[in-house]
Amino acid sequence: MTTSEAVKKSLAARNRKQVLFKGVGLGAVALAFLMLVVLVGSLLSTGYKALTQTHVTLEVFVDPEVIAAEKLPRGNFKKVLQASMQSLFPEVSSSREQRRLVGMLSNGAQFELRDMIVDNPALIGKSVTLTVPTSDPYDQLNKELIDRETPEQNRRLNDLEIEWFDQLKSAGAITSPLNTGLITNSDSRFPELAGLRGALIGSFWALFVCFWISFPLGIGAAIYLEEFAPKNRASDFIEVNINNLAAVPSVVFGLLALAVFIGWFGMPRSAPLVGGMTLALMTMPTIIIATRAALKAIPPSIREAALGIGASRQQVVFHHVLPLAMPGILTGTIIGLAQALGETAPLLLIGMNAFIAAAPGSPLDSSTALPTQIFIWADSPERGFVSRTSAAILVLLGFLIIMNSLAIFLRNKFERKW
């Protein structure tokens, strides 16, 4: 075989391998994209049902014999609602069926009526129009998540309860407005009342604390290591450990926070302050690495020119190098905070998965966060939390997409070509 023939044969073999490699790469990308589509599609197909909430509209007579102005906010508001429901179905006479009838209303209906009357006591003795959420089984029925063909003994609602609901729906008393409570309400044991307000505020406070701890400390450490620290074994040891910390599992930081912040320092459990400090420990290595990379990307000519006109070492760094590196630093910081926003394990270990029915007013108040709220809902046996879990995941993904998009925007807008 001649040399040219051998070259042609080897070239053909290399071309085949290259085509095979490209095919495998494209197949891997296509498979990853398909899995992403399946994931997002499954979340959308389940979570969109949480965007609406079934409501019932009633004419409620505020009986002054049951609710007295001088005893507010106390009063048997549930009895008033029961009387209103019974007026719509006068044929319901047994006490058991009456309890089932008023069970169509959410447990929060009595508190909505109470707040309305407390705000305006003049409503006592009058009829008011009240629109409240239905309880979760009726919400599931209206969203066709309860199969009417299922044998009655295997359904959450019997035939009579379904008949009551259908009568109200035929009368136009049933509506399905946008579920604003998903964002404006805090957590609840009742799916129809549960919302993300407390988790959103808790995540905000945790990220707020995380940013103000990790950002200045991370940038300061990176500047010292990159610009001022002598190159010796001690600095090499620190650099290796910073790189290792960036790869440590997040649950380890949770254990550290549990032992140090809560165990030794006695800081409040479930507080966004502790959560933010824990996330800061995780985020700091990422910020340090991103900041050092941004500082290294500045050409040496910038430093040399500044030194040549008489600038000190500090002036070179803080007046020339750091401003030019800031876009890259901000990009790394935002990506680090986005990663911290989605962390669950360390927050679970410090107790931010407790049932908190009120939104926190400060970083010291007990709270949950978005990832831990998703964990709580996913672990709930109530079927109504299934769609809310998917909706909460979509909200979390939305925030992550926004933060990563902001990082890309800042990088593209302020990045300089050298």
Image (tube, rainbow, N blue to C red):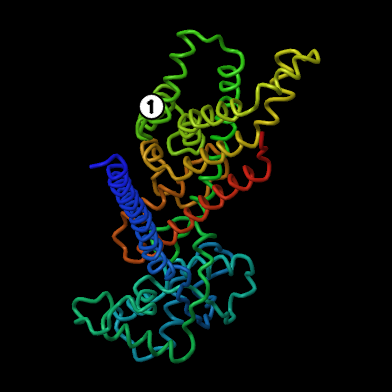
x, y percent for residue 294 = 59, 30
- Observer-nearest of 180 and 295: 295
Kindly give the residue lying farthest to the right in the view shown: 309
Return the residue nearer the eye: 222 or 215.
222
Residue 206 can be seen in this image: no
Give the residue pinned by disc 1.
256
Count of picture labels: 1
Dot 1 alpha-carbon crowd within 10 angstroms: few under 14, some 14 to 19, many 20 or more:
some
| Dot 1 amino acid type | Leu
Query: Residue 141 location, x and y as percent?
Result: 35, 78
- The residue located at (33%, 55%) in the rendering is 23
The answer to whether residue 405 is seen in the rendering is yes
Residue 317 appears left or right of 129? right
Considering the image in quadrants, where does the N terminus appear?
A: top left
The residue under the point 39% across, 39% down is 351
Q: Is residue 189 above or below residue 266?
A: below
Q: Quadrant of the C terminus?
A: top right
Q: Is residue 263 above or below residue 20?
A: above
Q: Secondary structure at mark 1?
A: helix
Residue furthest to the front: 2
| Residue located at (42% from left, 48% from top) | 371
Between 80 and 54, which is closer to the camera in this rendering?
Answer: 54
Query: Residue 41 at x, y = what percent?
Result: 39, 65
- Position of 199 relative to 305 (above/below): below
Q: Nearer the viewer, residue 280 or 269?
A: 280
Residue 169's quadrant in the figure?
Answer: bottom left
Image coords of residue 110 (percent x, y): 47, 69
Which residue: 72% across, 19% down? 316
